[in-house]
C-alpha cells in the first residue's frame, strides 16, 4: 500500500474527445487504490498533458480514448521522448482497435486497456510497472 | 446475479393481477391512438406507418459521408436518413483549426460550411424522406441555416422538407463534444427553435435522453432528465419567446437509448408517452391531440456493444431492436457490432439494417399494436419506472429545474455515481456481460471483424481542403454578413440571430467564423480554445 501511496498519475482525455465515462471511472479506481490522481479532464492537447506531467512530476499518464485517429497520442509520446521523460509510464484505455494497439505500443505506450478491463488489472499493472517498481524502468 | 431492474427495483418471480391493482384501462392506458397514449399514437400502429429504418452516417469527409448515405439507401434504409456531426463541427470549430485538423472527420460528418452540406446531400433527395442531422447546440443553428439556404439555392420547397436539425443545450453534460457555455447554448437553442416554429419549417429539435443514458444513467434517471428537459425547454419557448404550446409541441423529438433489459425498455417507452401526454395536457393545456404525442425514435445502445467477441453484438442489437419495435417508436437507428471498435463498417451497417428488416418483415411483431399491454409484469414495470422517474424529476424541479440542476452539479454527480455503480456491478459479476465477465476467451482467439477507420492523414486532408477553399471565397460578402451578425449578437438575448446566421451561411461563412463572431459579441474569446485570433475587425 505504501508504494501505491507514492504513485502519482495523470488521467486525461486528449484533443476534442469528450467521452469522459472511462476517464472518470478509472480516476476513481486509482484513487481507491491509493494512487494520487491528477485528473486533467477534457480538451487537453499533447503539449498540455506533457506540461502537466512535468509540473506535477507524475509517474504515470493514463489517456482515456473513445474513437480517435490516435495521432495525438503518438504526438504526446514524441514529446515525452523529446523531453527525456521516457520513464513516465503511459497507459491508454478505451475503444481502441487491435491494429492501433500494436501501433501505439511501438510508439512507447506501455499497455492498452480495452473496455471492461477490471480495476484490479489496471491498478496491478501500474503498481508493477511504474518507475521504481521491480518491473518498471528506473 | 442480481434480479432487479436497471434502476435497482427488485423483480419478483411471478406477476399477478395484484401487481396492477388500481390500474384503470381508460385512465392509465387508453386504446392505441387515445390519450394518455401509453399504448401508442396510431390505432393501427405500424400497419398505418412503419417505423423509419435508418442507420446513422458520418465519417471522413463530406464526400465520403455522402457515399455512405447512398450505400445505406441501397442497403434498405427507408423513410429517412440520419447524419451525425464529427467532433470539430460539434464544437463547432473549423476543420483547419489547430486542434480540429488533428481529428476532423472522426465519429461523424465535418459539416463546417454550406459547401460541406452541399457535398453531403449531392444526389440525395431533401424531400420524400426525413432528414435528420444529429449534432450539438452550436452546430445545430448552422444546420438549420444550411437547410434553409440549400432549399432556396436548389429550388426545393422548404415546406416539403422535414426532419430534425436542431439540438438541446445540455448535450455537453452527457459526454458530447461541445465546448460552449450553457447560457449561450440555451440562447442558440431558443433562437433556432423559435425561428423554425415561426417560419413553419418542419425541422425538429433533438431533446434526447440517449446521451444521458449512454453516459451512465439508469432508465429512471434518463426518463426523469428527459421530462425535466422537455418541461423546461418547452416552457421557455412558451413563456420567454411567446410561442403557442401547440406549435412548440411539434418541435421536440426524443431518441431513447434501448439497452438489454428487454421488458424494462418497453415499459420505459410506454411510460414516457404517458408522462409527456400528461405534461402537455395538464401543465401546458395542449389544445391539439397531436401536441400530447411526443415523437420517440430509438437508438439501440452503443454502450451495450462489447469490444470482446463482437459477433455477440449482432444478437444484442436484435434484442434491443425488437424491444424498440414492441415499445412502439417512429424511427430506429440501431447500433452496429463494431461499435466498441470504430464507426460502422459496411458489413456491420448491413447487418444492423438487415436486423430491422428481418424484424419488420419476417416476425409479424409489427402487425399488432402494443402487444404486451395487459401483461401484469409489463404494466407493473411501466408504472414503476414512471413512479421512480417522477421522484427524480421532482428533485430536479426542487433544485430549480434542469439548468439549475446542471449548474449545481446534481446531474453530473448523478451520472458519475451511476457509472461507478455499473463498473462495480460488472466487476462483482452482479451484472453479467457474456464474453466479458462470463464465457470470456483470450483476445487472440477472438474473431477479427473488418473496421472502417479515419487516419491522421485523412483528417489533415480535410483540413487542407478547407484551408485552400477558404481563400477562394468572396471575403467582402462574408465580412458584411458577419458584421451584421456581430451587431445582432450584441443585442439582448431574445433577439433572434437566425436571420443573420442564414445570410452568413449563404455566402459561405464557416461554422468557426459564425460561432466565433457570436462568442466575441458576448465577450467570450473568438476561439473557444484561444489558439486563433479573430480575423475580422468590427470596431
Image (cartoon, rainbow, N blue to C red):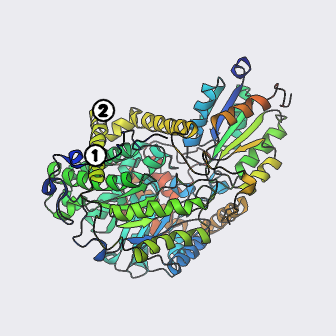
Mark 1: secondary structure: helix
**Alpha-carbon distance for marks 2 and 1?**
20 Å
- Circle nearer the N terminus (2, 1): 1
* Quadrant of the image containing the N terminus of chain A: top right
Asked which quadrant contains residue B202, the reply is bottom left
B171 in relation to B204, above or below? above
Taking A50 as reference, is B115 left or right?
A: left
Residue drawn at (24%, 57%) of the image: B374
In the foreground, B168 or B328? B328
Name the residue tied to disc 1. B386
Q: Position of residue B303 (x, y in %)?
A: 52, 51
- Judging from the image, mark 2 belongs to the subunit labelled B
| Quadrant of image for the C terminus of chain A | top right
Q: Going 24% across and 45% down the picture, which residue do you hit?
A: B19
Which residue is tagged 2?
A: B399
Q: Secondary structure at mark 2?
A: loop
Same-chain check, marks 2 and 1: yes
The quarter of the displayed image where residue A97 is located: bottom right
Q: Residue at 48%, 54% (x, y): give it.
A: B515
State the image coordinates of residue B197 (x, y, percent, origin top left). Answer: 27, 63
Callout 1 crowding tier (Cα within 10 Å): few <14, some 14–19, many ≥20: many
Q: Within 10 Å of the Cα at label 2, are there few (<14), some (14-19), or many (20+) other Cα atoms?
A: some
The chain letter for the residue carrying disc 1 is: B
Front-most of residues A27 and B382: B382
Residue A99, given in percent of the width and then of the height, sits at 75, 57
Residue A78 located left or right of residue B524 = right
Residue B440 shows up from this direction: yes
The location of residue B226, given as percent across then percent down, is: 34, 48
Amino acid at each position: 500500500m505504501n508504494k501505491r501511496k507514492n504513485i502519482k498519475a495523470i488521467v486525461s482525455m486528449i484533443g476534442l474527445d469528450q467521452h469522459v465515462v472511462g476517464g472518470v471511472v478509472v480516476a476513481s479506481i486509482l484513487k481507491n487504490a491509493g494512487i494520487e490522481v491528477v485528473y486533467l479532464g477534457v480538451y487537453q492537447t499533447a503539449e498540455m498533458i506533457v506540461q502537466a506531467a512535468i509540473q506535477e512530476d507524475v509517474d504515470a499518464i493514463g489517456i482515456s480514448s473513445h474513437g480517435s485517429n490516435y495521432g495525438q497520442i503518438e504526438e504526446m509520446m514524441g514529446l515525452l521522448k523529446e523531453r527525456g521523460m521516457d520513464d513516465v509510464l503511459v497507459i491508454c484505455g478505451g475503444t481502441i482497435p487491435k491494429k492501433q494497439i500494436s501501433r501505439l505500443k511501438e510508439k512507447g505506450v506501455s499497455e492498452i486497456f480495452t473496455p471492461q478491463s477490471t480495476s484490479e488489472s489496471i491498478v496491478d499493472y501500474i503498481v508493477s510497472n511504474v518507475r521504481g517498481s521491480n518491473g518498471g524502468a528506473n | 446475479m442480481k434480479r432487479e431492474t436497471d434502476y435497482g427495483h427488485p423483480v419478483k418471480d411471478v406477476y399477478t393481477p395484484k401487481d396492477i391493482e388500481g390500474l384503470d384501462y381508460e385512465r392509465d392506458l387508453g386504446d392505441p391512438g387515445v390519450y394518455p397514449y401509453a399504448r401508442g399514437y396510431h390505432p393501427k400502429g405500424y400497419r398505418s406507418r412503419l417505423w423509419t429504418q435508418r442507420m446513422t452516417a458520418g465519417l471522413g469527409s463530406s464526400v465520403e459521408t455522402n457515399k455512405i448515405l447512398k450505400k445505406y439507401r441501397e442497403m434498405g434504409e427507408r423513410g429517412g436518413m440520419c447524419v451525425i456531426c464529427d467532433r470539430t463541427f460539434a464544437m463547432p470549430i473549423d476543420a483547419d483549426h489547430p486542434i480540429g485538423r488533428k481529428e476532423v472527420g472522426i465519429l461523424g460528418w465535418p459539416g463546417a460550411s454550406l459547401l460541406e452540406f452541399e457535398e453531403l446531400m449531392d444526389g440525395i433527395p431533401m424531400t420524400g424522406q426525413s432528414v435528420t442531422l444529429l449534432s450539438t447546440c452550436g452546430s445545430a443553428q448552422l444546420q438549420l441555416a444550411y437547410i434553409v439556404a440549400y432549399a432556396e439555392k436548389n429550388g426545393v420547397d422548404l415546406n416539403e422538407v422535414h426532419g430534425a436539425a436542431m439540438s438541446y443545450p445540455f448535450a455537453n453534460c452527457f459526454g458530447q463534444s461541445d465546448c460552449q457555455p450553457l447560457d449561450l447554448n440555451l440562447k442558440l437553442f431558443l433562437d433556432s427553435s423559435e425561428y423554425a416554429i415561426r417560419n413553419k419549417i418542419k425541422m425538429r429539435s433533438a431533446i434526447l435522453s440517449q446521451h444521458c443514458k449512454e453516459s451512465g444513467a439508469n432508465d429512471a434517471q434518463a426518463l426523469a432528465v428527459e421530462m425535466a428537459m422537455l418541461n423546461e425547454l418547452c416552457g421557455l419557448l412558451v413563456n420567454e419567446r411567446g410561442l403557442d404550446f401547440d406549435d412548440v409541441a411539434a418541435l421536440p423529438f426524443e431518441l431513447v437509448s434501448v439497452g438489454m433489459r428487454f421488458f424494462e425498455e418497453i415499459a420505459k417507452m410506454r411510460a414516457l408517452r404517458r408522462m409527456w401526454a400528461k405534461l402537455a395536457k395538464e401543465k401546458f393545456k395542449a389544445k391539439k391531440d397531436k401536441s400530447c404525442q411526443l415523437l420517440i425514435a430509438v437508438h439501440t445502445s452503443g454502450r451495450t456493444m462489447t469490444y470482446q467477441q463482437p459477433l455477440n453484438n449482432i444478437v444484442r442489437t436484435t434484442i434491443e431492436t425488437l424491444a424498440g419495435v414492441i415499445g412502439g417508436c417512429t424511427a430506429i437507428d440501431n447500433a452496429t457490432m463494431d461499435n466498441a471498435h470504430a464507426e460502422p463498417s459496411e458489413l456491420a451497417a448491413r447487418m444492423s439494417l438487415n436486423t430491422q428488416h428481418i424484424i419488420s418483415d419476417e416476425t409479424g411483431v409489427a402487425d399488432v399494436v402494443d402487444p404486451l399491454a395487459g401483461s401484469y409484469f409489463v404494466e407493473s414495470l411501466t408504472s414503476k419506472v414512471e413512479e421512480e422517474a417522477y421522484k427524480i424529476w421532482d428533485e430536479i424541479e426542487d433544485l430549480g429545474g434542469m439548468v439549475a440542476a446542471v449548474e449545481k452539479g446534481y446531474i453530473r454527480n448523478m451520472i458519475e455515481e451511476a457509472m461507478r455503480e455499473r463498473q462495480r456491478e460488472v466487476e462483482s459479476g452482479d451484472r453479467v456481460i457474456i464474453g466479458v465477465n462470463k464465457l470470456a476467451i483470450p483476445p487472440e482467439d477472438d474473431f477479427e471483424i473488418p473496421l472502417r477507420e479515419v487516419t491522421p492523414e485523412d483528417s489533415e486532408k480535410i483540413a487542407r481542403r478547407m484551408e485552400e477553399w477558404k481563400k477562394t471565397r468572396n471575403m467582402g460578402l462574408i465580412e458584411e454578413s458577419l458584421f451584421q451578425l456581430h451587431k445582432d449578437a450584441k443585442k439582448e438575448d431574445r433577439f433572434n440571430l437566425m436571420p443573420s446566421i442564414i445570410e452568413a451561411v449563404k455566402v459561405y461563412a464557416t461554422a468557426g467564423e459564425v460561432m466565433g463572431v457570436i462568442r466575441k459579441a458576448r465577450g467570450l474569446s473568438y476561439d473557444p480554445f484561444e489558439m486563433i485570433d479573430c480575423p475580422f475587425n468590427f470596431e
